[in-house]
Image: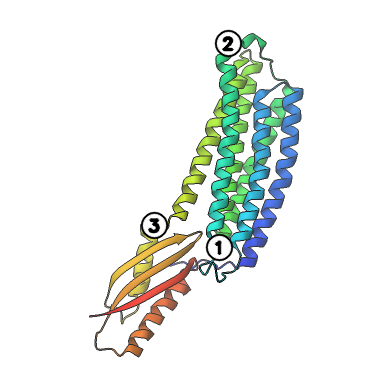
């Protein structure tokens, strides 16, 4: 079993903040460039893409706030910590993402079914150039953010990474739409805007679903539970397992396990066995925050 590297709260917050600041700067530059290109080159798809990139800036601020609150130490009112606040940040991010996309989708459908195709302007070459730059930049932001999200195991940062990927997809849609419009099909620019909305909606749904799973005490996957079972059974004094339950709390795991031990053992001996099981799980599963071990006699 490969042991994961434990990340301290300070490291977690420092990495998340550094990644967020870098992506905010990148998105501000991209948003301004897309908006300028959309206005100058008369591209509705590029303006829609600029709005999408601008929403990235807001969403990253949401992520930073959520991660900062989640990293707070446990207190009297919150003895189990504040990890779920990171999930709340991801849910807010999903809602903002969907509302942003909905506005783009409605505008696109209005143009598509309006019937006044002759009034639609053909985008200029500048919009094409900026679309290509956006695709490369946003894909780079996705891989950069994804790398550190996996490194510190942050659901909110991973949600932000997928926000960057959805923006890259939307820029691909914009590129196709702008290209089609320049080839003599002006409506393609609006079609591209609607395709962008579909990508945004899909990303918002995935982010929302992942955050909700963690908010409602979803159990670990079968592979993780199998590894936990094997870890407990490594102790030669454990004769079996009556119960093994797990729940995901934010980005941490809580474990409840009932083990079987020889009924002739003294209370002190049974306690030591439980402590050994507890320590072995902690050593091998850094994501496990809390373990409750109960000993049943056999």
In front of the other: 191 or 115: 115
Q: Earlier in the sequence, mark 2 or mark 1?
A: 1
Q: Secondary structure at mark 1?
A: loop
In which quadrant of the rendered image does the C terminus lie? bottom left
Disc 2 from disc 3: Cα separation: 51 Å
What colour scheme governs how the chains and residues are painted in the rendered image of this protein? rainbow
Do residues under tags 2 and 1 come within 8 Å of each other at their CB atoms? no
Residue 283 in the image, given as x and y percentages of width and height: 47, 74
The tally of labels here is: 3
Categorize mark 1 by other alpha carbons within 10 Å: few (<14), some (14-19), many (20+).
Answer: many
* Image x and y of residue 32, in percent: 75, 35
Indicate which disc, 1 or 3, sits on the residue closer to the N terminus: 1
Say the numbered circle drawn on residue 221: 3
Label 3, residues with CA under 10 Å away: few <14, some 14-19, many ≥20: few
The residue at 34%/69% (across/down) is: 230
**Is disc 1 in contact with disc 3, using a CB cutoff of under 8 Å?**
no
Q: Quadrant of residue 224?
A: bottom left
Please state the horizontal and vertical placement of residue 167, each as a whole percent of the image: 61, 37
Residue topped by disc 2: 115
Q: Which residue is mark 1?
A: 82
Please tell me in which quadrant of the rendered image residue 52 appears: top right
> In the depicted view, which residue is nearer to us: 275 or 230?
275
Labels 2 and 3: the sequence-earlier one: 2
Q: Quadrant of the rendered structure where residue 183 is?
A: top right
Q: Position of residue 186 (x, y in %)?
A: 63, 15
């Amino acid at each position: 079993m490969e042991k994961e590297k434990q990340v301290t709260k300070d490291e977690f917050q420092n990495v998340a903040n550094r990644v967020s600041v870098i992506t905010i700067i990148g998105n501000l530059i991209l948003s301004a460039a897309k908006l300028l290109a959309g206005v100058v080159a008369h591209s509705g798809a590029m303006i829609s893409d600029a709005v999408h990139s601008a929403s990235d800036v807001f969403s990253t601020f949401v992520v930073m706030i959520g991660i900062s609150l989640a990293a707070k130490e446990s207190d009297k009112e919150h003895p189990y910590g504040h990890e779920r606040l990171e999930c709340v940040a991801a849910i807010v991010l999903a809602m903002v993402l969907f509302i942003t996309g909905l506005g783009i989708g409605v505008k696109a459908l209005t143009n598509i079914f309006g019937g006044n195709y002759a009034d639609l302007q053909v985008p200029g070459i500048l919009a094409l150039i900026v679309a290509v730059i956006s695709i490369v930049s946003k894909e780079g932001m996705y891989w950069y953010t994804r790398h550190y999200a996996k490194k510190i195991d942050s659901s909110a940062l991973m949600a932000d990474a997928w926000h960057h990927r959805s923006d890259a997809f939307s820029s691909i849609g914009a590129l196709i739409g702008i290209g089609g419009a320049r080839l003599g099909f002006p409506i393609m620019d609006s079609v591209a805007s609607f395709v962008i909305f579909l990508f945004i909606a899909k990303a918002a749904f995935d982010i929302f679903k992942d955050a909700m799973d963690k908010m409602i005490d979803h159990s670990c996957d079968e592979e993780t539970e199998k590894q936990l079972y094997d870890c407990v059974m490594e102790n030669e004094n454990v004769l079996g397992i009556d119960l093994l339950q797990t729940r995901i709390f934010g980005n941490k795991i809580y474990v409840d396990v009932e083990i079987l031990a020889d009924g002739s053992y003294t209370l002190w001996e049974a306690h030591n066995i439980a402590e050994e099981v507890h320590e072995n799980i902690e050593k091998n599963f850094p994501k496990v925050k809390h373990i409750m071990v109960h000993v049943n006699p056999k």
